[in-house]
Amino acid sequence: MKELYDMIFKRKSFRRFNDTLTLSEEELQDINQEIKNLNPLVDDIEVKYKIVPREKTTSKRGEYCLLIYSEEKEHYLLNIGYMFEQLDLYLASKNIGVCWYGMGKVSEPEYNNLKYVIMLALGKGEDSQFRKDYKKSKRKETSDIWKGDLSLEIADFVKYAPSACNTQPWRVVCENNTLKIYRTTDVKSIMPKEKVPFYNSIDMGIFLYFLELTLSHNEFSFQKTLSPENDGSNLISIATYTLKAKKNRP
Ligand SMILES: Cc1cc2nc3c(=O)[nH]c(=O)nc-3n(C[C@H](O)[C@H](O)[C@H](O)COP(=O)(O)O)c2cc1C
C-alpha cells in the first residue's frame, strides 16, 4: 500500500516511449499476475483484458496495449477506473510507463461478450522518465475542487489523479468527517461533448482510488456508499465517505 501511495507522485502519462527498451516475458507475466490482484470497486461486474502489440490498435505509443472489456452494469466505468489505476501506480513502481488512451481504437469491439471500454498503452521506461516534481504537473487549485474542511491533509494530493484531457471532473465537499464526492458536468475540453460523461466516469473511478489510498495512508478508516447512477445537472453525486477516527487512535 505504502509503495503504491508513493507512486502517486512518480507516475505520469507516458507519451514518449523509448523504442529500444522492451518488456521481458517475466514482466509481462508479472503484469498478468498483478491484474488478478486488482481490487474491484464493485464486486459483481465481469471484467476481462487482453495485452496486444500496439500495432493491433491505432495507438502510436507503447510496446503493448492493454485492452479492457467489461460488462455494462451500473458503475462499470467507475469500476474500470478504480481497478486499472491500481495497475498504473503499480507499474510506475516497476519503471513501466503507462498512458490511459481513450482515443485508441481496437479491431475487436467485443471480447467474450464484454464490451470494449478503454486501453492503456504500456512500455518499459527508465526511472529518469518518471515524474520528479509532482507539484509541477498541471492541476487545478485545491480550492477549486475541494470545499469545506481542508485539515485532513488529503486534498493537496488526491488532485494529482490522471483524467481524460486533464479535465479533473472531481469535486469534493468535506464536512463533519464526511466526504461527498461529485462529478461536475461543467468541464471544458477538446473531447466531443457526448463522450465526456463516459471518460469522466472512468476518471471518477481513478479519483476514488487515489482518495482511498490517501485516506489509508493517513490512517483513516472509512465507510463508502456509492450513489445510484444518475444524469443529474451540474454536480452529479458519485459517492459518500464517512470517515472514522484515525486507525489505532482513540
Ligand atoms: C480516461 C482517460 C483517458 C485518457 N485518454 C488519453 C488519450 O487518448 N491520449 C492521451 O495522450 N492521453 C490520455 N489520457 C491522459 C491524460 O491526458 C492525463 O492523465 C492528464 O493530462 C494528466 O497528466 P498526467 O497523467 O501525466 O498526470 C487519458 C487519461 C484518462 C484518465
Image (cartoon, rainbow, N blue to C red):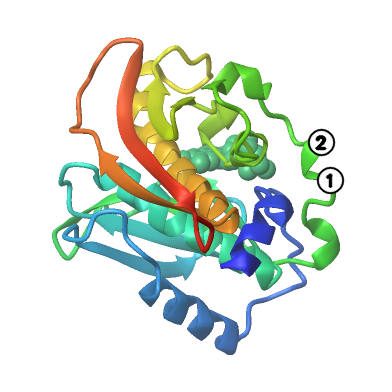
Q: In the figure, is residue 249 to the left or right of 43?
A: right
The amino acid at mark 1 is: Asp
217 in relation to 237, above or below: below
Locate residue 34, reporting x and y percent: 46, 76
**Who's the residue at 44% across and 57% down the image?**
84
Locate residue 133, reporting x and y percent: 84, 46
- Can residue 63 be seen here? The reply is no
**Who's the residue at 65% across and 24% down the image?**
142
Question: Of helix, strand and loop, which one carries label 1?
Answer: loop
**Who's the residue at 45% across and 62% down the image?**
66
State the residue position of label 1.
133
Locate residue 82, reporting x and y percent: 40, 51
Label 2 and label 1: CA atoms lie apart by: 6 Å
The amino acid at mark 2 is: Lys
State the residue position of label 2.
136
Locate residue 106, reporting x and y percent: 37, 52
Residue ranking furthest to the bottom: 26
